[in-house]
Amino acid sequence: MLVNAADMLKKAEAGHYALGAFNTNNLEWTLAVLQAAEEAKSPLIMQCTAGAAKWMGSFKVCADMVKAAVEALNITVPVALHLDHGSYEDCFKAIDAGFTSIMYDGSHEETFQINLDRTKELVELAHSKGLSIEAEVGGIGGVEDGVTSNGELADPDECKQIADLGVDFLACGIGNIHGVYPADWAGLSFDRLGEIKAKTGDLPLVLHGGTGIPVDQIQKAISLGVSKINVNTDLQLAFAAATRKYIEEGKDLQGKGFDPRKVLKPGRDAIVARTKELMEEFGSVGKAE
């Protein structure tokens, strides 16, 4: 049974650890991340963008797949299915499909007032259905699902206004970016993170673009109130490297090595291993026991 993410993130915030929110891109990703969470005894946020949902067929295909996998694998840790970087329209589609948590990313709207108004509406809708909801202030750098941002430092006062609407967790730009970080990246702004936390109290904060941030910066961000860390590119890189190694070693040409199950297995195993490593870094291992 899927749950919403509010309770698990409240516990993470109070316990000074973070939960990884791992994007799924297909069945292999879903099974691998669920396996890692069960083995690590870590609560799990499985999330999906609109683009990934389209690739899989629809939001409903994604939701049904995750629910079926949780049941088939006898997963005992709490699992939330979360919409990642949803537009206003995406939120309604994900709710109808059976997601248990949504993110409305209003940081790209023409005005902050639009972000404020739509977040208010969606908070009321989500909570009326027992779902958790994430909002965003300050665009996250890089490219995510076709949306590009230079990476802003979120305004603490705007963060407070969004927080006061009753969102369950809040994404705020603190210099983080999506994708691979460039060599000249300035690092996270812990001063801004501290200013935002001072305004938002015990509200769990979200760090998007978790791939490539040095572990010491990740752990300092957690100590300052970050309770959810989004991971997508990291697992894509792990999957690609393992798959490339299999092909370059010519294993697909040996016997029935071309069987897609054999071709995909190294990548799937790599996702399991890397997800468990990240859960260890975030401090969530054993938190579901």
Image: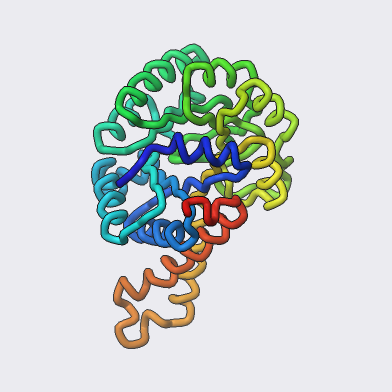
Q: Residue furthest front?
A: 289
> Is 287 left or right of 267, judged from the image as shown?
right
The color scheme shown is rainbow
Depicted 126 relative to depicted 244: above or below: above
Name the spot of residue 222 as percent of width and height, x first.
65, 42
Q: Locate residue 85: give its quadrant.
A: top left
Q: Locate residue 103: give its quadrant.
A: top left
Residue 282 or residue 242, whichever sits in front: 282
Q: Please give the name of the residue rendered at 41% of the width and 17% of the height, measured from the top-left corner.
A: 118
Q: Residue furthest bottom?
A: 255
Q: Please give the name of the residue rendered at 73% of the width and 35% of the height, measured from the top-left corner.
A: 190
> Is 137 left or right of 31, judged from the image as shown?
right
Name the spot of residue 241 as percent of width and height, x first.
51, 67
Name the spot of residue 165 as percent of width and height, x first.
48, 17
Depicted 179 relative to depicted 174: above or below: below
Residue 119 or residue 2, whichever sits in front: 2
| Count of labels in the image | 0
Residue 98 or residue 73, whichever sits in front: 73
Q: Please give the name of the residue rendered at 63% of the width and 39% of the height, measured from the top-left corner.
A: 176
Name the spot of residue 201 as percent of width and height, x first.
62, 24
Please say whether residue 178 is visible from this viewpoint.
no
